[in-house]
Amino acid sequence: MDDLTGYYFNTNALFVVPIEHLSRRGMSAAFRSHLAERTALPVGWADLFDAAFAAYWGRTEALAAQAPRHWFPPRLQHCCVVTDVASVRPYFQPFNKCSWLVYASDFDPSVSNVEFGAFQLVQAERMGLLQEVTQTVVRNLGYWLLRTDEEITLFREACDRTPRPDAAAYRALAKALPWIRRLHHQSINPARVIAPGATMELPQTGIVMLRTQQPELDTLVQEWAHAARGAMEAFYRAHAGRASSQVGRLCDWLRDRRPDVVVTGERGRLIWEPQAADRLGALRALLRDVPAPAVASIHADLEIIHQRSRGFLDSLRHPDQLPAPHLQMAQQGLSYVDAQRRLIAYNVREPGMERLRVPAPPYERFMLAARTAHEWGHLAVDAGWVPVAPARVHEVAALREELASLFEEIHQEAPAAVRALAADDLTRLTRGGAAIGAALADIVLRRVPDFQANILARCYLTVEERETYIRNNVYTLALVSPAPALFRRLARYAYEFQYLRLSLIADPRTYFLHSTWFADEYLRRGVLSEERLDRLLGIVGRLCDWYAVDWEQFTPEFAAAQNRGDNPA
């Protein structure tokens, strides 16, 4: 296997079946071996998982072939399997836009079967794409039009037995399957001639249904939403309770330790800073009714920010020479550089997060540590401490030209239909008079400071923190911009692939191709060949290799540790 086994099984709340240990047939043999060693899953669990994964693959492959406008081809994602229901928020994505959350019971032969397990993977994929819960069941209605009576029976039996937190949603779906299977789909089973006005099409699904079926669909959606709310409310109840002594411990630590962190709240309002460590009234009031587990989690978050910040600042010869944060630096995220104080800020009311309600979910604190080091890395880049290596300066202009020329070549030799699709987008991109190749190369070059920051940031991080950061930053771009922007996405892919060079993933190219739909969008459509893809990734990789840390700006002890391969974290 690799050196990441402990990472995949880092928490008792869930384990990760990672992209690099999945194929269309399920788990690798090596991962199955470690699964047996590190878990107490029931006999037959791995076999059922693999059978369900193979079924997911074959079925979505068939659906995508028959209805490509409404169905996704199969791909690999990090499969995060919850083993402690009370510790993991329902519908959470441990790795941003590249993970599926399922439950161990979904593949337990005593309560589940291949039909139920396969649909969980289909649901998780759709949910990750939509970033929404209730519409997934609607968008997936076409799945049931290709199932046999036997498959339907098996699925309904598992719905009756499942202990999932949202089990009521699946029981509602099982009850609705008789009328669902009478639906039609534009591509899968087109409707026969029906009286004008008697049917309606569900947007973005291809589903054609009788208007008289609308009440049944409305009922299913309502029951699904009710079950989802119930699952979330049960999770919140499990973490309820007053903070009590946790607030006191946190405030004492802030006053006595004066950690290198700023605590902010709504709209970035200052709540606490180390320069006024005794002013704790606002924080105490804010945390008064917050559950104890959430307060303890906030404390742990602030500890890790302080540790990574202190590690960075202590490694500098002249920390006072760090530039002030520029106003363009985002004032939001897991953590960020406060524009006024040149410290990392932590917003307890960060939009989209629930820091005042529940503890940080699995793997999030690893990402918080990595984000903190990355933000410091940006200031070091702004200071000029991660420059082009002196021996590579002469290559800069030539490599930029080589990248631009390759983009021109890719565009010129792409299929005519692809060029026509992208024409208006490329016209907008080159409006200032730049050539297409140069404009696409500039997209890559504008992202390079992020890579420079990561070159330095990794020096302060544990393996777990580095891997979490990388996996959160390599995902499909198919839905982040309109279809005509495919050449812009290609440039961004060429850059973001380089993150994988900082990982312990043994085969970055395979990981990338099998998890992002890149092969479907670019290789199979003939936008570029595998040979040109390798040239593109290689050129951008050489571009990233221009940069190196200027160790003269760091303490001799820190520089020596990096040369030895030691990691301070």
Image (cartoon, grey):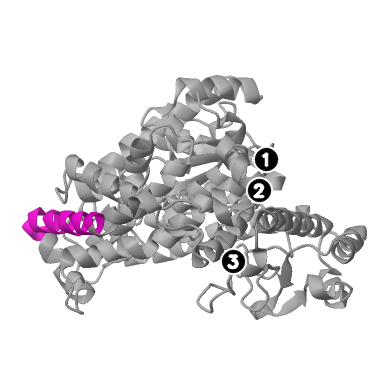
Q: Is residue 440 left or right of residue 367?
A: left
Of residue 370 and residue 449, the one placed in the foreground of this image is 449
Q: Quadrant of residue 27?
A: top left
In what element is the residue under mark 2? Answer: loop
Of residue 385 and residue 181, the one placed in the foreground of this image is 385
Picture layout, residue 79 above or below residue 394: above
Q: Quadrant of residue 251?
A: bottom right
Q: Mark 1 sits on what residue?
A: 13
Coordinates of residue 123 in the picture (x, y in percent): 45, 48
Coordinates of residue 191 in the picture (x, y in percent): 21, 56
Q: CA distance from mark 3 to mark 2?
A: 16 Å
Q: Mark 2 sits on what residue?
A: 88
Q: Mark 3 sits on what residue?
A: 352
Q: Quadrant of residue 333?
A: bottom right
Q: Residue at x 35, y 46 (%)?
A: 143
Circle 3/circle 1 CB separation < 8 Å: no
Magenta stretch prevailing secondary structure? helix
Q: Residue at x 24, y 72 (%)?
A: 197
Of residue 235 and residue 296, the one placed in the foreground of this image is 296
Circle 2/circle 1 CB separation < 8 Å: yes
Residue 367 painted magenta: no
Coordinates of residue 524 in the picture (x, y in percent): 18, 44
Q: Is residue 420 left or right of residue 294?
A: left
Q: CA distance from mark 2 to mark 1?
A: 7 Å
Circle 3/circle 2 CB separation < 8 Å: no
Of residue 544 and residue 510, the one placed in the foreground of this image is 544
Answer with mark 3 or mark 2, whichever residue precedes in sequence: 2
Kind of residue at badge 2 = Val
In what element is the residue under mark 1? Answer: loop
Bounds of the magenta span?
A: 398-417
